[in-house]
């Protein structure tokens, strides 16, 4: 698996982001969806990575800089054909390494509170993320779960 920064221009990447957004729409009410679209992911404060096996897109992930010491994990998604192969675990490990190298002191995330998000929450718990109050511009929402980790 090769993880590299991506410019979001490829057909496979666009399709994976569309799949990600459709999944969020299927599991969450519109007011509780915080996933970024292609334009949102192209903002300068965001770094977006894709995991590849040759020409096969395995998954993606991103971080958004909140400030010089705090980043937000965004857009973690494994392609449906590659679920349960460790893609998300490797992507998260890569992102955490980059966050550490950049000098962030904390990385936080928002994910869904519904049962369909249990695997994601378990992964974050395995990496030492703890449940927390809303951060940055988020507000309390029964459909959202907030987690954070000191680096």
Image: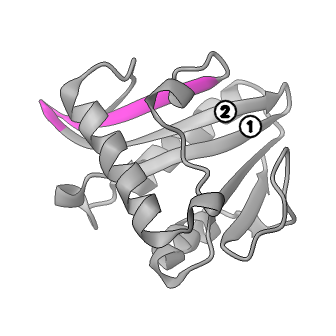
Q: Estimate how packed mark 2 is, as few (under 14), some (14 to 19) or many (20 or more) residues with alpha carbons within 10 Å.
A: many
Q: Estimate how packed mark 1 is, as few (under 14), some (14 to 19) or many (20 or more) residues with alpha carbons within 10 Å.
A: many
Q: Secondary structure at mark 1?
A: strand
As drawn, the residue found furthest toward the front would be 30
Q: Position of residue 107 (x, y in %)?
A: 74, 46
Instruction: Identify residue for label 2.
Output: 64
Q: Secondary structure at mark 2?
A: strand
Q: Quadrant of residue 124?
A: bottom right
Q: Position of residue 149 (x, y in %)?
A: 77, 55
- 137 over 31 or under it: above or below: above
Q: Which mark is residue 3?
A: none
As drawn, the residue found furthest toward the bottom would be 115
Q: How many numbered markers are drawn?
A: 2
Q: Is residue 1 among what the camera can see?
A: no
Callouts 1 and 2 close, C-beta under 8 Å: yes
Which stretch did the figure color magenta?
46-56
What residue sits 45% from the left and 78% below the top?
116
Q: Give the position of the C terminus as an image quadrant.
A: top right
Q: Position of residue 44 (x, y in %)?
A: 63, 15
What residue sits 53% from the left and 36% below the top?
62
What residue sits 81% from the left and 53% below the top?
138
Q: Is residue 121 magenta?
A: no
Q: CA distance from mark 1 to mark 2?
A: 5 Å
Q: Which residue is at the front of the view, 77 or 104?
A: 77
Q: Quadrant of residue 43?
A: top right
Which tag, 1 or 2, sits closer to the chain's start? 2
Q: Which mark is residue 71?
A: 1
Q: Is residue 74 among what the camera can see?
A: yes
Q: Position of residue 52 (x, y in %)?
A: 24, 35
Predominant secondary structure in magenta?
Answer: strand
Colour scheme of the rendered structure? one colour
């Amino acid at each position: 698996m090769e993880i590299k920064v991506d410019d979001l221009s490829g057909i496979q990447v666009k399709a994976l982001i569309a799949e990600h957004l459709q999944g969020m729409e299927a599991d969450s009410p519109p007011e509780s969806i915080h996933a970024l679209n292609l334009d949102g992911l192209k903002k300068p404060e965001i770094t977006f990575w894709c995991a590849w096996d040759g020409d096969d897109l395995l998954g993606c992930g991103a971080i958004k800089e909140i400030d010089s010491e705090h980043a937000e994990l965004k857009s973690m998604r494994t392609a449906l054909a590659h679920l349960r192969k460790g893609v998300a675990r490797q992507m998260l490990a890569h992102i955490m390494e980059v966050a550490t190298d950049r000098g962030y002191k904390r990385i936080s995330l928002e994910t869904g509170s519904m049962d369909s998000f249990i695997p994601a929450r378990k992964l974050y718990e395995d990496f030492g993320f703890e449940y927390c109050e809303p951060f940055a511009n988020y507000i309390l929402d029964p459909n959202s779960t907030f987690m954070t980790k000191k680096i």
